[in-house]
Image (cartoon, helix red, strand yellow):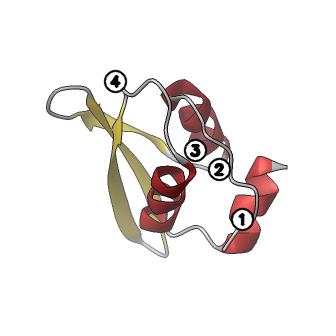
Amino acid sequence: MPKNLPSLKPKQLIKLLEKAGCSFYRQGKGDHAMYIRIVDNNKRIVPIDMGAKEMSPAYILRIFRQFGFSDQEIDNLLS
């Protein structure tokens, strides 16, 4: 598990995800936006709560895991 995962605002998380190759897919229900990442010819589509003021480290880690990021990839993104 990556160490020192920070709390992030949704826009900060989106910048990290786009830097890692994710892109906007479509608007979901309510405040959620759907983002997509293609890994080994598999689409991974994850909803992100854009209405949150700040996202907890546990929520951020869950999003990275749903996209299929390894611990090393997460550490590289956050450093």
Residue picked out by circle 1: 73
The amino acid type of the residue labelled 4 equals Gly
The amino acid type of the residue labelled 2 equals Ala
Task: Using the numbered discs, state the Cα–Cα distance from disc 1 to disc 2 in whole angstroms.
Answer: 9 Å
Task: Using the numbered discs, state the Cα–Cα distance from disc 4 to disc 3 in whole angstroms.
Answer: 17 Å
Q: Where 22 sits versus 42, above or below?
A: above
Q: Are marks 4 and 3 in contact (CB under 8 Å)?
A: no
Quarter of the N terminus within the rendering: bottom right
Give the mark nearest the N terminus, 4 or 3: 3
The disc at residue 35 is none
Residue 19 x/y as whole percent = 67, 42
Task: Using the numbered discs, state the Cα–Cα distance from disc 4 to disc 1 in whole angstroms.
Answer: 26 Å
The amino acid type of the residue labelled 1 equals Glu
Q: Secondary structure at mark 2?
A: loop
Residue at 16% from the left image edge and 27% from the top image edge? 30
The amino acid type of the residue labelled 3 equals Leu
Residue at 55% from the left image edge and 28% from the top image edge? 9
Task: Using the numbered discs, state the Cα–Cα distance from disc 1 to disc 3 in whole angstroms.
Answer: 11 Å
